[in-house]
Image: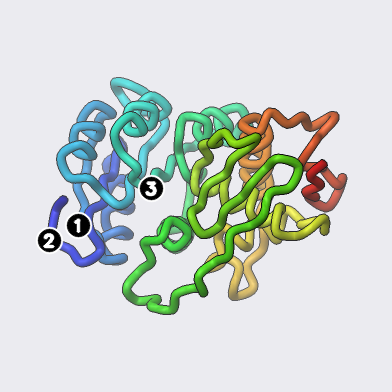
């Protein structure tokens, strides 16, 4: 682990010089020591060498694409991964999150937005910023419903006793729905939970954020063996959001 920064290391995998420089500055201002890479293979090697806290990965790279980069990272690293892309199609977003990314941000993006997403991910993964010392109260494990156990203390999910592997963001969405005890949770509320800094001061939930929430929910359903047309756990409330009903 690189010890040159109190916040640790960030790796930036981006072949566009201007965008790479912008991300580097943003993360350095957030307190990270940054190692840049211009190819996917170089990025994988840097993550292996420096064990970064956070890694940003562009989808379009000159050798292997960003999806493959993330898949390779997930074989040996739990670094927080933010994918960056100019593509806005839902299948691409789905592929990025299925490959193991924690977040998916479309270009063009504002540096403040990227930093807010990174900070939110770090807080939810148990690695908060030193500048935000307040810690949430120790969560209580959530009891099993319909054979599904969501343990917020250990951040684990079991279905029928078997461990279900979710990303950080997928877990937080499931825990929010599970903890609502049958109440409908709006997509906008889920987005505000995931990215609080972005919406705290009068920001609004974008269509891209709605789509990202939808993709995360689709991934959770798939991993639970749930169906969107005949759901056992996560029900869609058309025009509003989602409701958890375990049976």
Residue 159 versus residue 72 in the image, above or below? below
Distance between the alpha carbons at the discs numbered 2 and 1? 7 Å
Q: Residue under circle 2?
A: 4
Drawn side of residue 14 relative to residue 168, left or right: left
- The residue that appears at 68% across and 42% down in the rendered structure is 148
Distance between the alpha carbons at the discs numbered 1 and 3? 15 Å
- The residue that appears at 61% across and 41% down in the rendered structure is 216
Q: Residue under circle 3?
A: 80
The x and y percentages for residue 34 are 21, 52
Drawn side of residue 64 relative to residue 134, left or right: left
- SS at circle 1: strand
- The residue that appears at 81% across and 47% down in the rendered structure is 245
Distance between the alpha carbons at the discs numbered 3 and 2? 19 Å
Q: Are marks 2 and 1 in contact (CB under 8 Å)?
A: yes
Q: Earlier in the sequence, mark 3 or mark 2?
A: 2
The mark found on residue 18 in the picture is none
Q: Are marks 3 and 2 in contact (CB under 8 Å)?
A: no
- The residue that appears at 50% across and 32% down in the rendered structure is 96
The x and y percentages for residue 222 are 65, 30
Nearer the observer: mark 1 or 3; the answer is 3
Q: Earlier in the sequence, mark 2 or mark 1?
A: 2
> Which quarter of the rendered picture does the C terminus lie within?
top right
Q: Residue under circle 1?
A: 33
Residue closest to the eye, 27 or 182:
182
- SS at circle 2: loop
Q: Residue furthest front?
A: 161
Residue closest to the eye, 205 or 67:
67
Mark 3 Cα shell of 10 Å, populated few (<14), some (14-19), many (≥20): many
Mark 2 Cα shell of 10 Å, populated few (<14), some (14-19), many (≥20): few
Mark 1 Cα shell of 10 Å, populated few (<14), some (14-19), many (≥20): many
Drawn side of residue 108 relative to residue 94, left or right: left
């Amino acid at each position: 682990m690189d010890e040159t920064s109190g916040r640790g290391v960030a790796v930036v995998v981006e072949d566009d010089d201007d965008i790479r420089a912008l991300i580097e500055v943003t993360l350095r201002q957030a307190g990270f020591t940054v190692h840049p890479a211009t190819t996917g293979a170089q990025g994988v090697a840097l993550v292996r060498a420096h064990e970064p806290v956070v890694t940003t990965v562009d989808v379009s790279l000159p050798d292997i694409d960003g999806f493959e980069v993330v898949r390779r990272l997930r074989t040996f690293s739990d670094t927080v991964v933010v994918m960056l892309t100019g593509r806005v199609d839902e299948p691409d977003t789905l592929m990025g999150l299925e490959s193991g990314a924690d977040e998916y941000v479309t270009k063009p993006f504002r540096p403040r937005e990227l930093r807010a997403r990174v900070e939110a991910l770090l807080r939810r993964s148990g690695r908060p910023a030193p500048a935000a010392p307040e810690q949430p109260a120790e969560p209580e494990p959530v009891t099993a419903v319909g054979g599904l156990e969501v343990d917020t203390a250990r951040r684990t999910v079991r279905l029928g006793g078997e461990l279900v592997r979710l990303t950080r963001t997928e877990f937080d969405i499931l825990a929010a729905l599970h903890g609502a005890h049958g109440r409908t949770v709006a997509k906008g509320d889920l987005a505000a939970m995931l990215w609080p800094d972005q919406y705290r001061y009068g920001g609004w939930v974008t269509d891209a954020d709605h789509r990202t929430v939808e993709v995360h929910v689709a991934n959770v359903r798939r991993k639970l063996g749930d169906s969107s047309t005949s759901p056992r756990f996560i029900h869609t409330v058309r025009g509003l959001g989602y409701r958890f009903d375990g049976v």
